Image (tube, grey):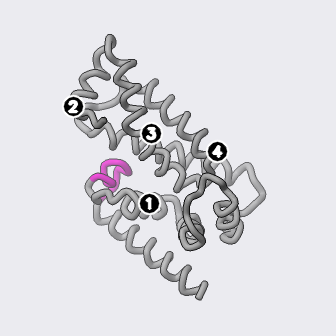
């Protein structure tokens, strides 16, 4: 069931319908947000942990949601920020290098929740090696099919900068696959 976003926002603003509306938010956006988080943190278990934080942060910050932007944009911003924060914390807390591309592919292929093939695992290796902004822009554009204008609202940057980041990310990913041939 898809609910009209404006109607959902109105329900979220009303204390008597807020809890029910948030249940609808969770039902409506969880899967899409999960896959965005998963592409950043890679592990199913980690993605679930981050998603709990995303939904908790969304619930506790409902009052700060400005109704002039789309609810989905606001939720994506929270999900991306939480995911990137998680990755940064993991980099500081671990001695295993995330630059070890083979390790990322092997981890994904061994994950029972990963439904991709070896090529998808290699693509995730290449994406994982990108800087945070390039990785995020690539994921939003490639996997979510988002317009640059929407990504611009999520990341608070210009469309021109996003296009450049996406182009550079694609070039780096192409080079990654050329080195594998």
Helix, strand or loop status at disc 4: helix
On whether residue 155 falls in the magenta region, the answer is yes
| Picture coordinates of residue 42, whole percent (x, y) | 59, 55
Query: Which residue is the site of mark 3?
Result: 30
User: In this rendering, is residue 17 above or below 162?
Assistant: above
**Does dot 1 land on a helix, a strand or a loop?**
helix
Tag 2 and tag 1, C-beta contact below 8 Å = no
Q: Nearer the viewer, mark 1 or mark 3?
A: 3
| Spatial CA span between label 2 and label 3 | 18 Å
Residue furthest out toward the top = 16
Question: How many neighbours does mark 1 have within 10 angstroms: few (below 14), some (14-19), or many (20 or more)?
Answer: many
Q: CA distance from mark 1 to mark 3?
A: 17 Å
Residue drawn at x 54%, y 51% is: 38
Residue at mark 3 to residue at mark 4: CA–CA distance: 15 Å
| Identity of the residue drawn at 27% across and 28% down | 8
The magenta region covers 150-158
Instruction: Residue under label 1, please give it.
Output: 139
Which numbered disc, 2 or 3, marks the residue that appears first in the sequence? 2
- The first of marks 3 and 4 along the sequence is 3
Mark nearest the camera among 4 and 1 is 4
Question: Which residue lies under the disc numbered 4?
Answer: 45
Can you name the residue that lies furthest to the right here? 95
Q: 128 or 155, which lies in front? A: 128
For the residues labelled 2 and 1, the Cα–Cα distance comes to 27 Å
Among the two numbered marks 1 and 3 on one chain, the one whose residue lies closer to the N terminus:
3
| Spot occupied by residue 21 in the image (x, y as percentages of width and height) | 34, 23
Q: Magenta span: helix, strand or loop, mainly?
A: helix
On-image quarter of the C terminus: bottom right
Earlier sequence position, callout 4 versus callout 1: 4
Residue annotated with mark 2: 6
Mark 4 residue crowding within 10 angstroms, few (<14) / some (14–19) / many (20+): few
Q: CA distance from mark 2 to mark 4?
A: 33 Å
């Amino acid at each position: 069931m898809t609910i009209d976003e404006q109607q959902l926002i109105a329900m979220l603003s009303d204390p008597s319908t807020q809890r029910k509306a948030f249940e609808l938010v969770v039902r409506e956006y969880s899967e899409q947000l999960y896959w965005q988080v998963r592409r950043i943190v890679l592990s199913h278990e980690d993605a679930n942990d981050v998603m709990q934080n995303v939904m908790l942060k969304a619930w506790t910050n409902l009052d700060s949601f400005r109704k002039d932007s789309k609810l989905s944009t606001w939720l994506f911003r929270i999900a991306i920020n939480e995911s990137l924060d998680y990755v940064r914390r993991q980099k500081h807390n671990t001695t295993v290098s995330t630059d070890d591309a083979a390790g990322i592919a092997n981890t994904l292929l061994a994950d029972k929740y990963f439904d991709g093939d070896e090529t998808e695992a290699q693509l995730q290796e290449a994406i994982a090696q990108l800087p945070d902004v390039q990785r995020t822009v690539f994921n939003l554009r490639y996997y979510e099919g988002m317009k640059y204008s929407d990504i611009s609202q999520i990341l608070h940057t210009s469309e021109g900068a996003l296009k450049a980041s996406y182009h550079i990310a694609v070039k780096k990913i192409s080079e990654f696959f050329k080195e594998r041939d």
